[in-house]
Every structure is written in structure tokens, then in C-alpha cells.
Amino acid sequence: MTTGMPGSALASITGMGSITALGEGTDPLWQAALDGTFSLQDGFGPIPEEIRSSGLTAPDFSTLIHRLQESPALSLSLRAGWQAFQQAGWTSLNPDDGLIIGTTTGQANYWEASLMAFLRDPSNSEEGVNRYGGTPLGMLTSDLQEILKHHGPAQTIASACCASTQAIAVASHWISSGKVKRCLVGGVELLCELTRTGFQSLQIASKERCRPFDKDRSGINLSEAVVFLCLEKAGAENRLAQVSGFGIAGDASHMTAPHPEGDGCRRAMQGALSMAKLAPSDIDWIHAHGTGSRHNDLAESKAIQAVFPAPPPVSSTKGVHGHALGASGALESVLVVRALREGRLLPNWGLENQDPEITINIVREPGHSSARHVMKNTLAFGGVNTSLIFSV
Amino acid sequence: MLYALRTSIAEKSSLAALRARPELRKATEMMLWAFAAAKGCLEGVSLPGHELGIVVGSGQGELETTKEYYRALALENAARPFLFQNSLHHSTAGMLSLALKITGPSVTVSDSFFSGESAVDMAATLLDSRQCLACVVVGTDTLVPTFDKAIRTRFPKDLERGEGAAALLVAREEGWDKLGGKADFVIESWSRGFEAGAKSKLGGYYEADGIAQLIAGRQTEGPLTQPKPDGTFSRFQLRKGT
């Protein structure tokens, strides 16, 4: 069954803001995705220091500068959120609006260095411990609520790398069900020693450019991103694109590897199609999770083959911006929305020799497209998979 | 209406026996608490794994494991992969999915004093969007002595902090019907009050214990107000089960 009409969507996306390793605003990210610029160093993609430390350009935040200087996650969130506000024409969040943040580490880099100093030698200042006391994960959302004077529904989703993908899904549902009128959604991930060293310990981090779906892949690249999207009712006149459906499903297979056949990913995609009332043949492009780890690449490609009798073109853009963990879903959704808007097909940068076990059509060069519906996948530790469908 | 089909509150005394179970041999303390609660509300429930969802709400998440990861890094310059994977907030939900063969959606939420309520809210979202037919909702937190003093700064001085886990099996009408048409109690709505002023006099309080408090007050007909340590509150509108 095919509909694809704007009125059948769940929600409109009307504004986007991003701060990534590639720069501030969605333009540098978009341009890099088009031309393949690779700026990550030694496999990591931190937000450049000159961007991280630059001041807020939004009004009304100057009195909070001390608090904001202490917590980059909070200040960068306000900056990216303000970009999204400006594009959407929003000036504030009302009590009947929502706020949802997806993150895995929240403000951990605010306290981890001094915590480690304390753990090395308890005679050191307890500052790190005390800092933590005020900033557990959910405080990022409640701090933002306090600054934005928002007294509406809010939620912090911490479902590993699916966090911000689920945040977009939940926000779409909140809007379509009438729970909120509008919703600000954020994906926030700043690298900390926990994630840097943790992924290295799992031996899946690469110092070279990640090469999703390539037989010579050497692992994933970790990166930072703070990305916000404004969501409003379906059919909004100023929409950039719409969310038509979503699916969330589990593997119950392994704590850190996906189901070998991509079982949960398959059901997540099928769930999204069902919600959007679309057939597999309606999907024009799949923006894959595509981390560049062998387990992920094989599982996701098998899932795609199981759902799509004739799979559409598939690309991962992590070869440009790296894997922003809990923020990856929001980050990559920005690229999907811009690709839909601008009629472009983004390639799978880094691919040289496609893994022979992967027979789906991986996009190698940027191209033009008249895509109307795009599937966006995310797979995460804990065996959870989330798929979104974006439509024009 | 959200039907609470089953309820369960984990007992600390049950955790030792759980450690012997093969599927839990790598579980953290918080995972054991969460498993005990989740398992308790799934006894006798027959539903395909893909029709069942899992939501974990926790204020602190796997903070003890995170701290141990940092300790190894700080003192031994060793990054321990096992501690890393278990340090994620979502690892508890992941372990529950594995151990209980839940292949529907899994989500972790962390919303400070409202983590339990937020988990119930997320379950309603998953049910309404037809991601699953029934959903296990777990609220859990454990004590982490290293951080206790710091965390206490967010609590009233006279409030006794605790740890624990509680779980609900919830469904909308379709799931309620499929699972026998009986509910322990019914949640008609819930809301969050931002106005400070509510006085908390709870003992053994943990940040995600909104579910435990909900179970304790489930015989209420009408509003059930849960004061939070920061003076705000949540309010459930309840009625007795059918």
C-alpha cells in the first residue's frame, strides 16, 4: 500500500542546527557529505576547539555564561538549538511543547577528568565527584528546560547509539498523538575518556578513515556532534521534510554485537514501513547505520536484503563525519533531510572494495535524486535497532 | 488508559541466588535488581518475545560500573572492555532483553527524580505507536558510595537514600485483552508538577522509585501524588483494576 501524501506523515521537520567535527551549522556537514572531505584525525572527530570555545550568539543567555562555560554539552546544545529555532522561526518553548534529548554520556566530560584525579589519589580535590552529583545524565535536559524556562513534557533517552533516533521517533509520536504541539529534539554526544578508551578496548576503533561495507574496513571512527531539530505537526507549510514512520525492535542476541542476520534491524525497518503505510518499493534510498565494523555491516546488509526484494541504493555517511554514538541518529537525519530537500543522493565515502558478502547496491558517487521516501537505520549496543522514514 | 497487569518489587535477598544463574553471570548489581523486578512481573505471562517491550528508567544508570571503569583507567591505565560495555545506561535494558528473550523495542530513559514516571510514559508511547503489545517497565537505581556525598547535595539532608528496583507489566486494551483481561490497577493519566512546595518524607528513596511508589499506592482511587526531593511532584490518576 502506498500513500506518501504529506497528510499521512507523523510530523514535520522545520528547523535544524548542528555543531560537529566539520563545523558549526548544517552547511559544513552537508558540503563534506557531498564532496567527501575527511577531517577526522587519528580516527577521532572532536568538535574543533575554536568552535567549542566560541561564545553563544543567541540572545538572553549572557547571564548564564559561567554555567555554560563549565559544561560544553549544555552550551553547545543551546547554540545548536538556537540554530534550529532560527530556521523554524521559533523563539521559545511553550508548556504545550516538548523537549527530548538523546545522549549516551550527557555531561560526562564536565566531571570525568577531576573524578579520575580523585580516584588516583583520594587526597585530591573531590571536585570531580561533586561535579558529578549535579550532572547525572538527565540533568542535561532539565538544565536546558531551566534555561529555556520550559515547563512542558521532557524526556532524556539513553538507549546507546539509538538514543537520538528514538528521540525523533518519540517526538513524532508525541506530535501526531496531540501530546505536544511542537517538539525540540536533540542528539548530544561529546567524546570523553570513557568512550574513547572503551571503544579502543573493544578493538573496533580505527585510526584510519572508516570504510563501511568495504572488505578492507578497519573499524569505526568516533566523533562528536550536537544536533537539534524542530518538529511540528505534519504538513506544516515551512516543513523541510516529514517523519512518516518509525520502528524499534530488539535482537536479544548479544550485548555489543547485532543479531548475525540483522533480525531486530529487519523488524525495525518493517515496523517503520507499516507505520508509514509504505511498501518496500516506495523507499528510494537507505541511509544506513554503516559504522564500518564487520558485524554491523553484515547484519544491516542482511536485514536490508530481507526487507527489500529489490533493495534501493544504500549509503553510510560515517566516512565523512564519523560515528557520533547517541547523536548519530540526529546528525544523519540532518543529512537525509537536506538530501531530500536538495534532490541529492549522498555516497558511501571510503568505500573502495565492497565486501563480497554484501551484495546490496552501495552508492559510490554523489548523484541527483528524486527520492520521496528515505529509510534511516540505527543499530545500538544492547541489541536495539531503530528505523525512521523521512518523506518529502 | 494504561493497564498495569502485573507488578513486582525486587527484594535484596533474592539477588544472591540470581548471581548463580548462567545468563546472569556477567550481570552488574543493578542488572540483578532490574532482572529480579522484571522477572517477577513476567511470571506466567505467555507472549511472543517480539510483542513485548522493555523500558528501563534510572537516574544514575550503571554509575558503579562506570566508576570502576574509570578507576581501572586511572590506577592501572587499563581500559576494561567488559566494564565499558556494562557502564552504558542502556546496558541494563540490553541485559534484560537477552536474559528474558524480549525482542520487541527496548528503551532507556534517565530523568532524574522522574525517571520512573518517564519510563511509564515511554511505555505508553511504545504501546500507542504499536511497537509492542505489552511492555515491562523497570525503575531502578543502586547506591554508589563514592558519589553518595555528592549526590546527596541534590536531596534534603534528612532524606534517607536507598536502592532497589520495581517493575510493571503494562498494556493498552488490546494487550490487556490478550493477556487475560485482568489488571492489577489502571493508570488513567499522569502529570508532572513543576511548582516546588511538595514535602518529601520518604525513606530509602532512589531517583527511579516512582514505579515502586506507584505500586505501593496502587489501591488509590483518584490522584496519587508523589513528592520529589526537590519539592516538585508527579501525580498519577489511578483506579482499581478489573
Image (cartoon, helix red, strand yellow):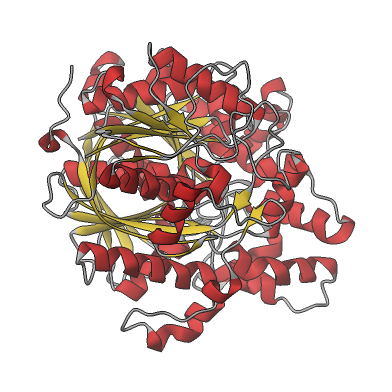
Q: Quadrant of residue B113?
A: bottom left
Can I make out residue B182 in this image? Answer: no
Query: Given the current orientation, which residue lies at the most extreme bottom position?
Result: A63
Q: Residue A136 placed where, x, y %?
A: 54, 62
Horizontal side of residue A278 vs A196, given as left or right: left
Q: Is residue A348 above or below residue B77?
A: above
> Which image quadrant: the C terminus of chain A?
top left
Q: Quadrant of residue B5?
A: top left
Residue in the image at 49% along x and 49% along y: A35
Residue in front for this viewpoint, B5 or A53: A53
Q: Is residue B102 above or below residue B29?
A: above
Residue in front for this viewpoint, A287 or B242: A287
Horizontal side of residue B127 vs A291, given as left or right: left
Q: Residue A219 placed where, x, y %?
A: 69, 38
Q: Is residue A83 above or below residue B26?
A: below
Horizontal side of residue B66 vs A100, given as left or right: right
The number of callouts visible is 0
Residue in front for this viewpoint, A361 or A252: A361
Q: Residue A338 placed where, x, y %?
A: 32, 48
Residue in front for this viewpoint, A358 or B17: A358
Horizontal side of residue A389 vs A220, given as left or right: left
Q: Residue A40 placed where, x, y %?
A: 63, 55
Can I make out residue A25 in this image? Answer: yes
Q: Quadrant of residue A388?
A: top left
Residue in the image at 39% along x and 59% along y: A26
> Which image quadrant: the N terminus of chain A?
top left
Query: Given the current orientation, which residue lies at the most extreme right position?
Result: B76
Residue in the image at 37% along x and 19% along y: B51
